[in-house]
Amino acid sequence: MTRFILQSGQEPRQTTSNVGHLKKPSIQALIHGLNRHYYSMVIDYRKNELEEQMLTNLYKKTWVAGLITLDFACHTLANHEIIANMARHSENYNLRVRDEEGRTVEELLVANVGKVDPKRHLVSNVDTHMCEVYPEPRNMASMK
């Protein structure tokens, strides 16, 4: 044991004994005969505040991420694809609105089962495209 662990009065992290830590097999495991070949052991670990803070900051974006620009050719292709999809979904949405005229609610529910909802795709494409093109500044988001 290191001197730090002895001085801090904390017990070491590793537990070498599994006596008392084995879980009883579930009924489903007993039915399938898994009790003979496998056992389930509870795995537990402890973290202090500094380790939790380190883990929360592990995949956090840095301020430099906002300065990175995308490749222009890839960005142009992605924009063309998004606009083509939006045009296709808007045409499909117009067709669906025309088809809805004169139908009851039950007929509409049955007619649209299993079909792509063009309005939902239009809204999601517009939202994602607007967030990519016009990112909201962080200080403005906190002012709301």
Image (tube, rainbow, N blue to C red):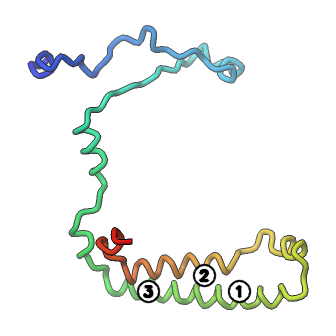
Q: Is residue 4 left or right of residue 64?
A: left
Mark number, residue 122 = 2
Q: Nearer the viewer, residue 144 or 102?
A: 144
Of callouts 2 and 1, the N-terminal one: 1
Q: Is residue 139 left or right of residue 78?
A: left
Number of callouts in the render? 3
Q: Which of 101 and 82 is in front in this view?
A: 101
Label 1 Cα crowd, 10 Å radius (few <14 / some 14-19 / many 20+)? some
- Residue drawn 56% across and 75% down? 124
Question: Would you name the residue on which mark 3 appears?
Answer: 77
Label 3 Cα crowd, 10 Å radius (few <14 / some 14-19 / many 20+)? few
Label 2 Cα crowd, 10 Å radius (few <14 / some 14-19 / many 20+)? some
Per the image, label 1 sits on a secondary structure element best described as helix
For badge 3, the amino acid type reads: Leu
Quick one: quadrant of the C terminus? Answer: bottom left
Per the image, label 3 sits on a secondary structure element best described as helix
Q: In this view, does 98 lie above or below 125?
A: below
Q: Is residue 142 above or below residue 42?
A: below
Q: Is residue 5 left or right of residue 121?
A: left
Question: Would you name the residue on which mark 1 appears?
Answer: 93
- Residue drawn 25% across and 37% down? 49
Quick one: quadrant of the N terminus? Answer: top left
Check if mark 2's residue and mark 1's residue have beta carbons within 8 Å. Answer: yes
Q: Tell me how far mark 2 sits from mark 1, CA to CA.
A: 9 Å
For badge 1, the amino acid type reads: Tyr
Q: Which of marks 1 and 3 is in front?
A: 1
- Residue drawn 38% across and 83% down? 134
Of callouts 3 and 2, the N-terminal one: 3
